Amino acid sequence: MKALVWQAPNKVSVEKVPDPRILNSRDAIVKITSTAICGSDLHLLDGYVPTMQNGDIMGHEFMGEVVEVGPGVDTSKVKVGDRVIVPFPISCGSCTQCLRGLTSTCENSNPNAGIAEKMFGHPCGGIYGYSHLTGGYAGGQAEYARVVLADVNAFKVPDSLSDEQVLFLTDIFPTGFMGADMCDIQPSDVVAVWGAGPVGQFAADSARVLGAHEVIVIDKEPYRLQLAADAGHTTIDFDTNDVRSKLLELTGGRGPDKCIDAVGMEATHGSVPIDIYDKAKQHLRSETERPHALRQAITSCRSGGIVSVVGVYGGLLDKFPAGAWMNRALTLRTGQCHVHRYVPRLLEIIEQGKIDPTRIITHRLPLDDAPNGYAIFKAKQDNCEKVVLKP
Amino acid sequence: MPAPTAETATHGRNPELLARTLGWASLGLGIPQLLRPDAVDRAVGVGEGAKQRAVTTFVGMRELTHAAALLASSRPSKWVWTRVAGDAVDLATLGRALKNHDGKKLGRTIAATAAVAGITAIDFYTAVRGSRGKGATVQLTGSTTIRKDPKEVYEHWRSMDKLPEFMTHVDEVVVRDDRISHWKVSAPFGQTVEWDAEIGEDVPGEKLTWSSIGDADVKNAGTVIFTPAPGDQGTELHVFITYDVPGGKLAEALARFFGEDPHQQIDDDLRRFKQVMEVGEVMRSDGAPYGKKARKEFPQRPAHPMSDKESTEVAT
Ligand SMILES: NC(=O)c1ccc[n+]([C@@H]2O[C@H](COP(=O)([O-])OP(=O)(O)OC[C@H]3O[C@@H](n4cnc5c(N)ncnc54)[C@H](O)[C@@H]3O)[C@@H](O)[C@H]2O)c1
Ligand SMILES: [Zn+2]
Ligand SMILES: [Zn+2]
């Protein structure tokens, strides 16, 4: 089959690879009908996530039709012919973490738990197409994919909903929703969201659905800010504004009650000298995180508020504003998304028309064009917000 | 029977503590090298320029990796060996700088070389302390929590012949009778060792001990304690294994050098045991398809499906 493989930092290409096979008795094979490129893939592309190897298939947002199931699959849950979406984190459904709904920290799904433990102190769960640290699972930017523990990790979706309506249930919609959910939103809350990428857009929409008084979205890409404004959110361009002052102005001097970091480790900075400094460091590949958005979220958040982090971080972080965090009683919450626990609720929200996930799709490309999809999504060319690939 | 003490107890002074201190030193060294490579180069007197900068940045990256590794690892002393190797690279780099030196600020480069040589000595001392013991007995401890009740977890272990399913080196356990079993185990460097083991204490759902008897190739003993975990989390499993290493600690260190770390392996064995109990089988991925046959973490297969040929190799 054909698949998009990582070869070296900033080098991906579509290659012929063997078809996936059943490795564990509860596996299924899915023929992929739609798959997407995620902001997390950019961290892999740029070489900021360790343990990528030449030949790794990327992609963790995929859906399709079940074409084969292993002998151990509970066919009352999933069977050949079903149309399914596949959450990006792999859950075993039976460990304590999974049963508590913390599926991205599953204790059984990462065969490379030993590597992850060395990096993180304790291992994280398995993720498709996301380095060897998270298990070395082949990803879903391909014609077919192996789905692990399929009776727990493949969710049937109704035929009345199109691929494009349900595809983002695999990751970015639940991730944005979890970003808002972790904020314990109250009716009087002003929620600020850093990042108007796909995750930021869904975080903003979700904050609104969860009853926020106002949602403010911060980015520097005019077309992305426009997309957020079209959805009814207030926007701040951090290239032309001092974010903290603007936030004070918009909140009567209180600061946003809840802040969501939907940017992660590759944030850029509005200040020219700091941006040059960072670009130089980036050029030398001498830093792992550039936590500008996180720092700004912490220093901007109203005292006693919540800073909810769904942007991805991978290593060690510098100049963390611990004083602001501690002295102003802020709560920091984070995690890879526990997708499984949100899927049923979000399916309902889509069916009720409360959030339209298709509003962020700007590019639909054949799988063969995936490297080009990466390039424009990364460079924010051609007003690219989200690329959907059709194998 | 080995008491449930940390491995360090047999080593006199505590090398783990020393290793952790080195972790923080690495962090102190690494950050300036990353953020201000030019300034570090000036301080050690090796001149500025793209090539120097690249080397210094690389050195800084490595220091940070070590910091993370030493701080995160539960048994940091093994990581010190990566520092020893790193120090050797630094010395070689500085040595080259000395040889090709343009004469300016030579004193600073010599001072830096001496400082790094000093660090190497400490690293070497720690590494040797960490891997050399007085006796030739290795003690391994490991624990995990399994969401099944203690009886069930105990019974799976007590059957003995299911151990090869998740214990990486155990090829076969043949149960001779209620108390005696015969073990076939692959040892480092392609050897196979065998012994008979006899059950000692046997308290269903609580405790199980065994030890090799007679003329064992490798004298060894094991204890497993099963205790209820807090709340509804099932069973805590505490495993203690001791064995005599043919060739002593040096052989162990050598095996470790080639990617076989017994401490890592007992942790991985227990993770696989947990998978067997909770999921029903050992989890595999395209990058790590070997299950219990995995011997080292890197390099792995690429994370894409196996060819028919690879697949048959993995199966056998
Ligand atoms: N937690 C999870 O489970 C999870 C899941 C999916 C994605 N993610 C992460 O979420 C983040 C966003 O993903 P995405 O797909 O939307 O990516 P994206 O790259 O499309 O979006 C990031 C946006 O942040 C903006 N940005 C950069 N610096 C900024 C700053 N200082 N302030 C405000 N905005 C800034 C960029 O202009 C861009 O529009 C990534 O880090 C991704 O890895 C996390
Ligand atoms: Zn993603
Ligand atoms: Zn689990």
Image (cartoon, coloured by chain):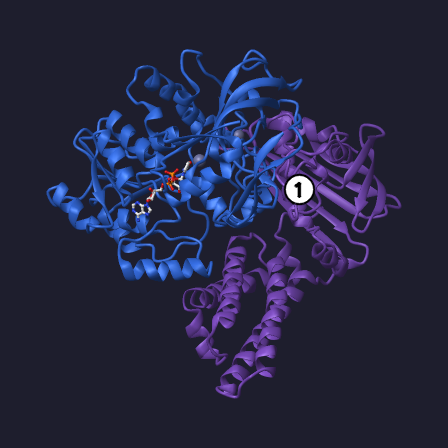
Chain colours: A blue, B purple
| Residue drawn at 14 percent across, 44 percent down | A254
| Residue drawn at 20 percent across, 44 percent down | A302
Q: Is residue A147 visible?
A: no
Task: Give the camera-side residue of B285 and B69.
Answer: B285
Image-based side of A306 in relation to A137, left or right:
left
Image-based side of A305 in relation to A57, left or right:
left
Q: Identity of the amino acid at label 1?
A: Arg
Q: Is residue A50 above or below residue A204?
A: below
Q: Is residue B250 above or below residue A68?
A: below
Image-based side of B35 in relation to A126, left or right:
left
Q: Which class describes the residues within 10 Å of circle 1: few (<14), some (14-19), or many (20+)?
A: many
Image-based side of B80 in relation to A363, left or right:
right
Q: Is residue A375 above or below residue A288?
A: above
Location of residue A211 in the rendering, given as x and y in whole percent from the top left corner? 22, 26
Location of residue A387 in the rendering, given as x and y in whole percent from the top left corner? 42, 33
Q: Quadrant of residue A252?
A: top left
Location of residue A264 in the rendering, given as x and y in whole percent from the top left corner? 38, 45
Residue bearing the label numbered 1: B301
Task: Residue at the far left: name it.
Answer: A252
The quarter of the image that holds ligand 2 is: top left
Task: Give the camera-side residue of B308 and B120.
Answer: B308
| Residue drawn at 39 percent across, 24 percent down | A342
Q: Quadrant of residue A55?
A: top right
Q: Is residue A179 visible?
A: yes
Task: Give the camera-side residue of A112 and B209.
Answer: A112
Which quarter of the rendering shows the N terminus of chain A?
top right
Q: Tell which subunit mark 1 falls on.
A: B
